[in-house]
Amino acid sequence: MVRRHGGQSVGQTPVIEIRDLHKAYGPLEVLKGVSIKAERGHVVSLIGSSGSGKSTLLRCCNLLEDSQQGEILFDGEPISWKGRGPDRRPGDPKQVRRVRTSLSMVFQQFNLWAHMTVLQNVMECPLTVLGEDRAEVEARARQLLDRVGIGDKCDVYPAQMSGGQQQRAAIARALAMQPKALLFDEPTSALDPELEQEVVKVIRSLAEEGRTMMLVTHDMRMARDISDHVVFLHQGLIEEEGPPSELFSAPKSERLQQFLAATAA
């Protein structure tokens, strides 16, 4: 288990709180009433089979997807909505921009800009979205690329890098926004095992720093080692949740037992 600095204080407001969230694509219900919290300085891992709603939940959290029912609060501030059901949309564009700049997301497929160098990729959002000073942004970007172990790749383009290096660049880009929380959507599933470990090492070190993170992952070992709380989703509902020591060593749900047996095979 990762040992972190700081931690959650009694009475402190969660960074992310989701209450009774519902999401459907037409007649297909993907989330059927999910409630979850990410406490300050804690790591929450979402596990479950493909199609269980994990990535959809993460995208709804970051307002990349519109949900039809339920509440999303960021630092205790509820997202305002207009419309109902299928027509529901966020009601305040300024609030959406503010939330998105504070919740940096790292995607499965890296999503780096191919026409920019790695350094330019990391600098772009603080410059264009936050309007920060270029010299300060560049200094921070170089420091972050050193932090994730690719400081020598500043002038390289994404296509010239391995998948593991690209994902570490994507993590540096997310950190450059100085977010209050990091969202990871299957950050290692597109990588072969050797490159996967490069990225796991970086994510593990972020957990040790006490970063607030919500993580969708197929890597049960990483979920067990770095999480404060693990949520097992099944068919759009939370089937079981709890600290990793309990969830992985003594799963109560038959579905979770089957899932863990299959992933260990």
Image (spheres, rainbow, N blue to C red):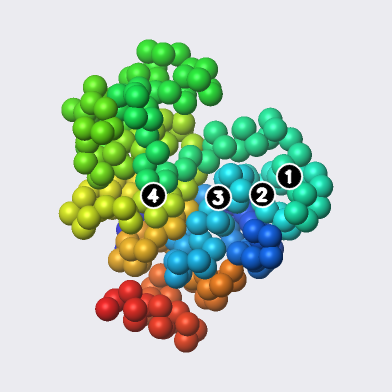
In-image side of 31 versus 168 (left or right): right
Screen quadrant of the N terminus? bottom left
Q: Residues within 10 Å of mark 1 (few under 14, many from 20)?
A: some
Screen quadrant of the C terminus? bottom left
* Residue for point 81% across, 47% down: 83
Of all residues, the one furthest to the front in this rendering is 26
Q: For mark 2, what is the residue?
A: 66
Query: Looking at numbered disc 1 in the image, what kind of residue is underneath it?
Result: Arg
Residue 263 visible at all = yes
* Residue for point 59% across, 71% down: 237
Q: Earlier in the sequence, mark 4 or mark 3?
A: 3
* Residue for point 47% across, 26% down: 125
In-image side of 223 versus 48 (left or right): left
How far apart are the two marked residues, 1 and 2, measured between alpha carbons?
6 Å
In the rendered structure, find residue 89 and report the number of the disc placed on it.
1
- Tag 4, which secondary structure? loop
In the rendered structure, find residue 29 and report the number of the disc placed on it.
none
Query: Looking at numbered disc 4 in the image, what kind of residue is underneath it?
Result: Gln
Query: Looking at numbered disc 3 in the image, what kind of residue is underneath it?
Result: Arg
Q: For mark 4, what is the residue?
A: 108
- Tag 1, which secondary structure? strand
Tags 4 and 2 touching, CB below 8 Å: no
How far apart are the two marked residues, 2 and 3, measured between alpha carbons?
9 Å
Q: For mark 3, what is the residue?
A: 59
How far apart are the two marked residues, 4 and 1, measured between alpha carbons?
26 Å
